[in-house]
Image (spheres, rainbow, N blue to C red):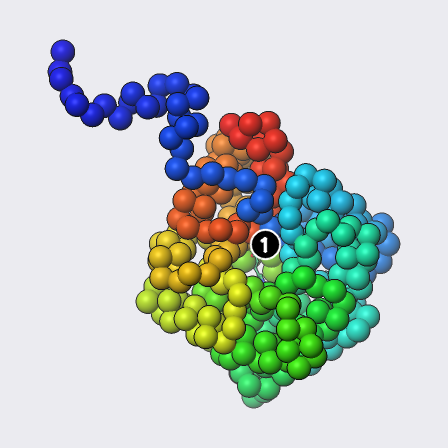
């Protein structure tokens, strides 16, 4: 018999021992659950490329929110589907816009839940871009003012955290300044700092009706090939006052998550986006992989890479697995 001083299998044999030496934990405390809210009553429209996810009206949103809070999920992230789109994204910052109404309703009826709002214009612009378009290009600086107005309107409605996802330069500073001026000095900013121009947003754009009508988002979102630049983007957001930084998507960018965790001392969120959800759901439905196990493995890997917060459409599914001991 071979004599080996170190036999790693010794610690793998027994489930209880495996549990004791496990390095990464996944908990319901880590999750943020994204939801799409739309006008109307009793609306619950399935999103075809995201099985199990729906566009919901506010009455249905309240049920989702109560459900999430009841499962111990600490926060939801809200996206709005407006009644009207225009060139200036008017409903993004309207006092009675869909998000503003939704935030008020959830804060009123489900107090044990944090409401984070996505701050972006793309769901509200007629052309589907994340900023003001002039001469066929997305203009950075004129967009900042509208983003800041949007963030303040969310804070006014009661949002606990605002999360700018537009990738305009200088938006965190503009939003911080506007929030402070409106005396929302304690409203934190979770910045989508390293947000890549990703094909994995495909299902989301169907869900939010926010696909660009011309061109793409490569003029403002990051090139997937760049890692050093991601650290620069994050450093900028930190300087401008971001309280929580984010890497998005998650699975194809675990190296970026890991670097961000090592380089910055801030809470780090990772957004496991619609396409990541769709891949696992689709393969699960086809019987090509075990959906629950793949879900738990993917979420654990995002935590192992260094994310403190995991934004995921699987939040409820994973919470259910965790409730039953965590083994899928
Ligand atoms: C808005 C926004 C997008 C996502 C989050 N905020 C879409 C985009 O940038 O095109 C994607 C989320 C997902 O795919 O789950 N700018």
Q: Quadrant where the N terminus lies?
A: top left
- Residue 42 relative to residue 130: left or right: right
> What is the quadrant of residue 10 in the picture?
top left
- Residue 323 relative to residue 215: left or right: right
Using the image as rendered, state which of residue 23 and residue 186 is in the foreground: 186
Up the image or down, 281 lies above or below 20; here it is below
Q: Where does residue 253 sit, x and y in percent of width and height?
A: 40, 55
Judging by the rendered image, the residue that carries numbered circle 1 is 203
**Residue sitting at x 77%, y 57%:** 107
Q: Is mark 1 within 8 Å of ligand 1?
A: yes
Up the image or down, 316 lies above or below 268; here it is above
- Residue 220 in view (yes/no): no
Quadrant for ligand 1 reads: bottom right
- Residue 243 in view (yes/no): yes
Using the image as rendered, state which of residue 232 and residue 222 is in the foreground: 232
Q: Where does residue 119 sit, x and y in percent of width and height?
A: 63, 68
Q: Residues within 10 Å of mark 1 (few under 14, many from 20)?
A: many
**Residue sitting at x 79%, y 45%:** 63
Question: As drawn, which residue projects farthest toward the right?
Answer: 41
Q: Secondary structure at mark 1?
A: helix
Q: Where does residue 99 sit, x and y in percent of width and height?
A: 74, 64
């Amino acid at each position: 018999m071979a004599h080996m001083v170190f036999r790693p299998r010794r610690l793998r044999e027994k489930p209880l021992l495996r549990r004791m030496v496990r390095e990464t934990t996944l908990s319901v405390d880590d999750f943020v659950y994204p939801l799409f809210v739309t006008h109307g009553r009793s609306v619950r429209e399935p999103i075809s490329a995201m099985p199990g996810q729906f566009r919901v009206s506010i009455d249905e949103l309240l049920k989702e929110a109560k459900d999430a809070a009841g499962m111990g999920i600490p926060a939801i992230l809200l996206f709005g589907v407006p009644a009207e789109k225009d060139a200036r994204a008017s409903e993004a910052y309207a006092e009675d816009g869909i998000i503003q109404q939704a935030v008020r309703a959830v804060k009123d009826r489900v107090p044990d839940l944090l409401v984070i709002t996505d701050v972006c214009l793309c769901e509200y612009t007629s052309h589907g871009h994340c900023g003001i378009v002039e001469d066929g290009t997305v203009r950075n600086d004129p967009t900042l003012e509208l983003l800041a107005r949007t963030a303040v309107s969310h804070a006014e409605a009661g949002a606990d955290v605002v999360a700018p996802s537009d990738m305009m330069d200088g938006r965190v500073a503009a939003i911080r300044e506007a929030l402070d001026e409106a005396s929302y000095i304690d409203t934190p900013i979770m910045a989508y700092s390293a947000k890549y121009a990703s094909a994995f947003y495909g299902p989301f754009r169907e869900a939010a009706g926010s696909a660009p009508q011309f061109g793409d988002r490569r003029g403002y979102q990051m090139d997937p090939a760049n890692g050093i630049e991601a650290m620069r983007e994050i450093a900028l957001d930190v300087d401008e006052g971001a309280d929580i930084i984010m890497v998005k998507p998650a699975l194809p960018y675990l190296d970026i998550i890991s670097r961000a965790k090592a380089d910055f001392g801030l809470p780090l969120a990772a957004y496991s986006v619609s396409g990541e959800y769709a891949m696992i759901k689709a393969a699960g439905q086809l019987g090509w992989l075990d959906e629950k196990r793949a879900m738990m493995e993917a979420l654990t890997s995002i935590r192992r890479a260094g994310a403190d917060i995991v934004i995921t459409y699987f939040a409820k599914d994973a919470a259910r697995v965790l409730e039953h001991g965590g083994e899928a």
